[in-house]
């Protein structure tokens, strides 16, 4: 612990944003990096708690050793800090940008509403490590002769592929899209994470011997059975991309869309790619000069809000069926767990109108084209309150109420009747496997990430990919040196 009294002497500071009036004019990242000395001061605030809840299980899914690398940063040892961080997290530059930071919620200093700026320090470590040349390919020195296929190159697939490659296996990653990254590339907007960070990691992994096959839709272009025949193990990391059905009348009107096709299209535009994408509608969706309504209160809805503003929307309204949460949580009742409290994303802060405890009753249109969204207030059981109906003008509406599982037109279609799926009361269809060995009901076939656990955080996908890689390595070799 470098600065014993740091948490008493130094106030919490996090990276600042460009003003909303400036940042909505572009799709680049808008966070203003902190200087190295300021990052070191923030790292010095870590208390080195006797029981550091920040690194798990309530805080960090990958169990980052946060007090350790805070101390290393405070002592200006950036190389040791990135080595420590990489021991638990393959891609800290991803999580340092897009993770909601449950570690900060679990920080002891959060009892005083001033947690250590863990996310800021994590991103700074990764960015500094690239700047100083500490992140290089780490190819295996011994090759096992085993061959592993990974279906999907999102955070789970990338993490698993990197771990398996470093264990000495020949790894082939199959990606449906034209570039690797999955929803990291095509779902998360560039203003939250620019895609050059993915490109750098892909180049590192190629230097470690991982082979990427892009534009290959497994189950259609290449059969799963062929991969099983050609490889010693196959890991399915297909994500959770099928939108949850809203069941709202008027959903077929022109101007009503699921959220993900909209986000994917804009990410492809920013990446100078054709907007046509396998599995998604290809008609252009643009919010310029339009009144936009976003149905849903999560991260995907927030991403639609920020994207619409950058495209030039006149007004953006976000509808959330949940009641408006309190401004401040009861610390003694919920800490160190993630608290329900009023949170405002950077996109919402750009001018969104937020409606809470509101249900979407119907999309209204004229001549088949959307003109408005009919809503009403709901009670605590989410039942409509009579007499509270109102209509919001809308030229464009996005439905962002979650996902129910992977696409069913490729891998699942080929393996229908052979692969056990877990269905819940909300209609989700996740592939069944436990979180110890990640094995499915098919021999030599493993699964990890959102396709197994359902839609979740990037950091959870990285954890599952790492653990599945260890399980596969252990199954192929009898034991494993990969971290658990």
Image (tube, grey):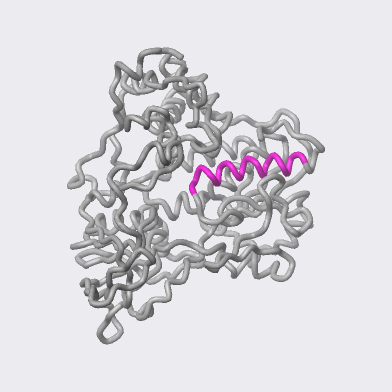
Q: Residue at x 23, y 56 (%)?
A: 352
Q: Residue at x 51, y 49 (%)?
A: 181
| Residue 3 position (above or below residue 253) | above
Residue 305 visible in this rendered orientation of the protein: yes
Q: Position of residue 93 (x, y in %)?
A: 45, 36
Q: Is residue 448 left or right of residue 2?
A: right
Q: Is residue 320 left or right of residue 92?
A: left
| Residue 42 position (above or below residue 219) | above
Q: Position of residue 12 (x, y in %)?
A: 30, 27
Q: Residue at x 35, y 23 (%)?
A: 42
Region rendered in magenta: 457-474
Kindly indicate the quadrant of the structure image that contains residue 22.
top left
Residue 221 visible in this rendered orientation of the protein: no
Q: Is residue 182 left or right of residue 160?
A: left
| Dominant secondary structure (helix, strand or loop) of the stretch shown in magenta | helix
Q: Quadrant of the C terminus?
A: top right
Q: Position of residue 138 (x, y in %)?
A: 62, 29
Q: Position of residue 105 (x, y in %)?
A: 41, 37
Does the segment drawn in magenta span residue 164?
A: no
| Residue 152 position (above or below residue 112) | below
Q: Residue at x 52, y 58 (%)?
A: 177
- Of residues 118 and 324, the one nearer the viewer is 324
Q: Is residue 148 left or right of residue 390?
A: right
Count of marks overlaid on the render: 0
- Of residues 376 and 171, the one nearer the viewer is 376
Does the segment drawn in magenta span residue 470?
A: yes
Q: Residue furthest bottom?
A: 367
- Of residues 132 and 319, the one nearer the viewer is 319
């Amino acid at each position: 612990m470098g600065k014993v009294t740091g948490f008493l002497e130094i106030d919490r500071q996090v990276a600042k944003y460009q003003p909303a009036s400036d940042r909505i004019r572009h799709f680049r990242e808008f966070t203003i990096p902190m200087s190295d000395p300021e990052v070191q001061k923030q790292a010095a605030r870590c208390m080195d708690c006797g029981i550091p809840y920040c690194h798990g299980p309530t805080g960090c899914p990958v169990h980052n050793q946060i007090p350790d690398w805070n101390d290393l940063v405070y002592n200006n040892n950036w190389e040791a800090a990135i080595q420590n961080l990489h021991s638990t997290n393959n891609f800290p530059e991803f999580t340092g940008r897009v993770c909601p930071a449950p570690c900060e919620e679990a920080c002891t200093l959060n009892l005083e509403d001033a947690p250590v700026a863990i996310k800021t320090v994590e991103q700074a470590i990764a960015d500094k490590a690239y700047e100083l040349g500490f992140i290089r390919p780490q190819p295996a020195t011994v090759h096992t002769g085993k061959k592993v296929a990974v279906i999907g190159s999102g955070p789970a697939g990338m993490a698993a592929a990197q771990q398996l490659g470093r264990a000495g296996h020949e790894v082939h990653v199959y990606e449906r899209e034209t570039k690797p990254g999955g929803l990291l590339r095509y779902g998360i907007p560039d203003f939250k994470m620019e895609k050059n960070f993915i490109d750098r990691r892909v180049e590192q992994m190629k230097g470690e011997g991982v082979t990427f096959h892009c534009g290959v839709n497994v189950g259609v272009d290449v059969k799963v059975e062929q991969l099983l025949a050609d490889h010693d193990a196959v890991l399915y990391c297909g994500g959770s991309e099928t939108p949850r059905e809203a069941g709202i009348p008027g959903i077929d009107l022109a101007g009503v869309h699921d959220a993900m096709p909209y986000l994917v299209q804009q990410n492809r535009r920013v990446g100078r790619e054709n907007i046509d994408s396998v599995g998604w509608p290809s008609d252009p969706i643009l919010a310029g000069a339009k009144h936009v309504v976003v149905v849903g209160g999560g991260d995907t809805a927030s991403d639609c809000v920020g994207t619409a503003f950058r495209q030039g929307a006149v007004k953006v309204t976000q509808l959330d069926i949940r009641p408006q949460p309190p401004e401040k949580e009861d610390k003694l009742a919920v800490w160190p767990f993630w608290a329900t409290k009023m949170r405002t994303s950077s996109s919402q802060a750009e001018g969104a109108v937020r409606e809470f405890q509101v249900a979407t009753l119907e999309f209204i249109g004229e001549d088949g084209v959307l003109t408005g969204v009919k809503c009403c207030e709901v009670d605590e059981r989410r039942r409509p309150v009579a007499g509270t109906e109102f209509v919001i003008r809308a030229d464009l509406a996005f439905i962002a109420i979650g996902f129910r599982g992977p696409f069913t037109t490729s891998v699942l279609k080929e393996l229908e009747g052979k692969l056990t799926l877990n269905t819940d009361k909300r209609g989700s269809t996740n592939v069944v496997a436990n979180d110890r060995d990640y094995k499915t009901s098919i021999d030599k076939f493993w699964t990890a990430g959102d396709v197994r656990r359902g839609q979740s955080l990037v950091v959870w996908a990285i954890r599952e990919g790492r653990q599945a890689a260890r399980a596969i390595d252990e199954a192929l070799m009898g034991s494993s040196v990969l971290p658990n």
